Image (cartoon, rainbow, N blue to C red):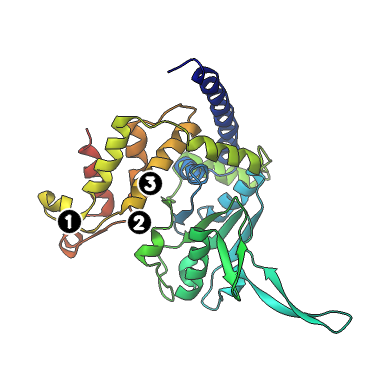
Amino acid sequence: MNKVDIPEEREAGKRLSASAETFAKVRAGLNAVIFGQDEVVEQTLVTLLAGGHGLLIGVPGLAKTKLVDTLGIVMGLDTRRVQFTPDLMPGDITGSEVMEESSSGQRAFRFIHGPVFTQLLMADEINRASPRTQSALLQAMQEKHVTVAGARHDLPRLFHVLATQNPLEQEGTYPLPEAQLDRFLLQIDVGYPDLDAERRMLLATTMGDEKAASRVCGPEDLQEAQNLVRRIPVGEQVMEAILSLVRAARPDADQANGGQIAWGPGPRASQALMLAVRARALLDGRFAPSTDDVVALAGPVLRHRMALNFSARAEGVTTAHVIARLCQSLF
């Protein structure tokens, strides 16, 4: 390393430390309002810091909607919510053109922006909308713009989707195809809180002691953090762990273990895991990710990007079991 690089490295270190301190306060602010969901809060912040979108899966009543609302307040983001229903049309999300007549009698079309033009969009029960409507949102997630009547409309520079899905009530739903699931950086499974957390929740929400969320940072802080995440160095050992894990989750590599995997993750999973481990390192105030980050985020990155074959499912094997086995093989 030459001497010219030292001041730049020190400056980057100061910026990283400042950003880590900011998002430690963000996490604390979220945990003060959302009880018993520490891992969910962490994975959601990792998703945003990595610049991606998240799919929250959990039964009703586990504060998924409240999490997104609180995120918008704490991070100072423009937030909107869309309740997905079978009759929801693509234009209800992207926006549409309307004919307007001026005082002089001239007619012209004007584009009215839909709710997708926001910094943080909650797509509530995304699997209840038709595939056509799902595709309109997922195209916007991937391309960061929408096209209406042949005209392109760019989305905000900061644009994140947190979609929710109920795993129980599947009647009248349209499950997302695998290619569309791959658009989500992480699948965040929202489980039940533990006994202590549920006790604190009861006391806070039924006795008038519930804390109100307050703003900690702004959109510019999130943009700065996202830029820093992509500059965090990744060691050779961590990179090899990412490649080994993702490649081992593919059918051809799983033959030695009885061929339990029907289809597995593509290169986008490697990219997602690389960004996610960097984001987790920043969130913890570390200057580089470790293999522990790879193991911690293997499930959220891989579980919606792979599926087991019939024989494995018949034996009671789950995707979580397979991912845990693959993680053990890293050491």
What amino acid type should be assigned to the residue bearing mark 2? His
The structure residue drawn at horizontal position 19% and vertical position 56%, both measured from the top left corner, is 251
Going by the numbered disc 1, the residue's amino acid type is Gln
Q: Quadrant of the N terminus?
A: top left
**Is 7 placed above or below 181 here?**
above
Question: What is the CA distance from the residue labelled 2 to the residue labelled 3?
Answer: 15 Å
Q: Is residue 209 above or below residue 24?
A: below
Question: Residue 73 vs residue 165: left or right?
Answer: right
Q: Which residue is mark 2?
A: 304
312 or 274, which is in the foreground? 274
Tag 1, which secondary structure? loop
Which quadrant of the rendered structure holds the C terminus?
Answer: top left
Residue 59, image x, y percentages: 45, 59
Q: Residue furthest bottom?
A: 105
| Residue 130 visible in rendering | no
Q: Is residue 90 above or below residue 286?
A: below
Q: Secondary structure at mark 3?
A: helix
